[in-house]
Image: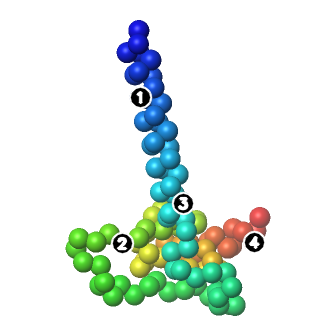
C-alpha cells in the first residue's frame, strides 16, 4: 500500500515540474525579444522590418523564438516583424491584427 502513495507522490511532483517548466518557457518567449522598452518605440505605427539575418548563429547555436500575436506561431526573432510593440510573423499578420482590433 505504501508503494501506491509513493507512486502518487512521484506523479504529482512530475506534473508540478512539467507545469512550471511550461509556464517558464512561455514567460521567457513572451519577453520583449528586441530589447526595447515602450519609451523608446518609434512614434509611428510603421512595421519594423525583420532583423537582418547576419549569420551570427552558427550551426550549434539556437536562435530565440517569438510568438506571433495574430496566429501564435513561433518564428525566429530574426524573421519577426514588430509593430506598435507587438510581434508578428509577417507584415500581413500585423495588418490583419490591427484591422481586427479596429473593427471590434
Which comes before the other along the chain, label 2 or label 1?
Answer: 1
Which comes before the other along the chain, label 3 or label 1?
Answer: 1
- Asked if residue 6 can be seen in this view, the reply is yes
Identify the secondary structure beneath mark 4. Answer: helix
Is label 4 or label 2 in front?
A: 2
Is label 2 or label 1 in front?
A: 1
Mark on residue 93? none
Q: Quadrant of residue 52?
A: bottom left
How many angstroms separate mark 4 from mark 3 (CA)?
28 Å
How many angstroms separate mark 3 from mark 1 (CA)?
26 Å
Residue 47 image point, x, y percent: 58, 84
Is label 4 or label 1 in front?
A: 1
Is label 4 or label 3 in front?
A: 3
Q: Residue at x 47, y 57 (%)?
A: 25
Is residue 74 depicted above or below 8 in this figure? below
Q: Residues within 10 Å of mark 3 (few under 14, many from 20)?
A: few
Is label 3 or label 1 in front?
A: 1
Residue 88 image point, x, y percent: 54, 72
Q: Residues within 10 Å of mark 1 (few under 14, many from 20)?
A: few
Which comes before the other along the chain, label 4 or label 2?
Answer: 2
Identify the secondary structure beneath mark 3. Answer: helix
- What residue is pinned by disc 2? 63
Q: Residue at x 49, y 64 (%)?
A: 29
Which comes before the other along the chain, label 4 or label 1?
Answer: 1
Mark on residue 102? 4
Q: Quadrant of residue 10?
A: top left
> Pointers 2 and 3 in contact (CB under 8 A)?
no
Amino acid at each position: 500500500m505504501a508503494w501506491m502513495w509513493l507512486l502518487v507522490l512521484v506523479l504529482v511532483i512530475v506534473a508540478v515540474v512539467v507545469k512550471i517548466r511550461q509556464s517558464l518557457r512561455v514567460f521567457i518567449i513572451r519577453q520583449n525579444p528586441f530589447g526595447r522598452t515602450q519609451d523608446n518605440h518609434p512614434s509611428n505605427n510603421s512595421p519594423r522590418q525583420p532583423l537582418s539575418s547576419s549569420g551570427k548563429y552558427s550551426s550549434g547555436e539556437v536562435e530565440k523564438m517569438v510568438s506571433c500575436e495574430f496566429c501564435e506561431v513561433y518564428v525566429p526573432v530574426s524573421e519577426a516583424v514588430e509593430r506598435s510593440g507587438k510581434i508578428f510573423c509577417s507584415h500581413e499578420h500585423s495588418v490583419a491584427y490591427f484591422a481586427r482590433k479596429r473593427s471590434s
